Image: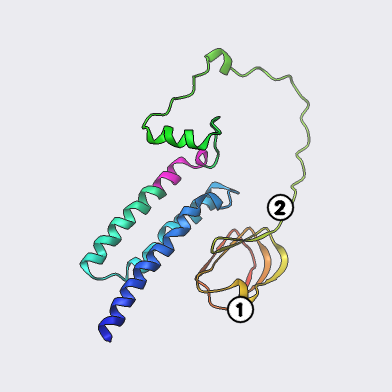
Amino acid sequence: MIALEKKNRKFMNHIRCVEDSLNLFAWFMIPTEDTESYMAQLADFYSTIDFMGGKLSEDLDKKWYKSFREVQKDFYELIKNNYPTVMTWSGTNTDVQAQYEGFIGGKIEAPTPKTAEAEKPKPAPAKKAAAAPAKVPKEPVKKLKFNTWEVSNFVDAEIVFEEDDVDPSKTFNFFNCEKLKVTIPDKFKNFMIQRCKRMELNV
C-alpha cells in the first residue's frame, strides 16, 4: 500500500510539472504594456516548473526532468530574444498550410530588400509644436485566460471573485492597479502583483 502511494505521488509530480509548464506557452497572451512587465511575467511562467521538478528525487525522474526543462529553456530563450517582434506577424502569406510547409522545408525566402533611395525618409514639413495630449486612463480588464485571471487598470475599486471562479489550478495576476480591494474565497495556485499601489488582498 505504501509503495503504491509513493508511486502515485511520483506520477502526480510528473503531471504537475507538465501542468505548470503550460503557462509558458501562453506567452502571446501576456499584457504588453511595457517590456519590463512582459519579461517579468514570462520569467515567472518559465520558473514555475521548478517548484514540482525539484521534488523529483530518483535518478530516472531527474533525467526526465532535465530533458523536459531543456525544452522549456529553448522555448523561453526564443521568445525572450525575439521580443517584441515575435508578437507581430509581419509577413504577407495568409495561406497557413503553405506557410507551415515553407518552414518545415528548411528554407524561407527572404523579402526583397528595399533600395537605399526608397528607404530614405522624406523630410516632413515643419509643424508648430502642439501641446501634449492628456493621458487617458486605461480601461479596467478582468478576464480569465486558460487557468489565469488577468486583472489590470482598476483604480479605487473592489473585486470579489465567486467560488466557482477559484480552484487550486487557478493563478491570479494583477497589473497597474491602485487602491484595489480583492477577495479570493477559496484555494488557488499562486498570484503575482506588478506595478500596483495600495492593494488589499484577502485570501
What percent of the width, then of the height, locates residue 55?
A: 32, 71
* The stretch drawn in magenta includes residue 192: no
What range is drawn magenta here? 77-86
Q: Quadrant of the C terminus?
A: bottom right
Q: Is residue 2 above or below residue 78?
A: below
Kind of residue sitting beneath label 1: Pro
What percent of the width, then of the height, locates residue 150?
A: 60, 60
What percent of the width, then of the height, locates residue 51?
A: 38, 67
| Residue at the disc numbered 2 | 138
The residue lying at 62 percent from left, 74 percent from top is: 164
Tag in front: 1 or 2: 1
Label of residue 44 in the image? none
Q: Is residue 96 above or below residue 60?
A: above
Left or right: residue 96 versus residue 47 is right
Dot 1 and dot 2 residues touching (CB under 8 Å): no
The residue lying at 25 percent from left, 82 percent from top is: 3
For the residue labelled by badge 1, is the local secondary structure a helix, a strand or a loop?
A: loop
Q: Nearer the viewer, residue 91 or 123?
A: 91
Farthest residue, direction left: 59
Q: Nearer the viewer, residue 96 or 201?
A: 96
- Determine the CA span between mark 1 and mark 2: 27 Å
Q: Nearer the viewer, residue 59 or 201?
A: 59
| Residue at the disc numbered 1 | 185
One can see residue 44 in this view: no
Farthest residue, direction top: 117
The residue lying at 31 percent from left, 73 percent from top is: 10
How many C-alpha atoms fall within 10 Å of the one at disc 1: few (<14), some, or many (≥20)? some
For the residue labelled by badge 2, is the local secondary structure a helix, a strand or a loop?
A: loop
What percent of the width, then of the height, locates residue 201?
A: 61, 73
Kind of residue sitting beneath label 2: Lys
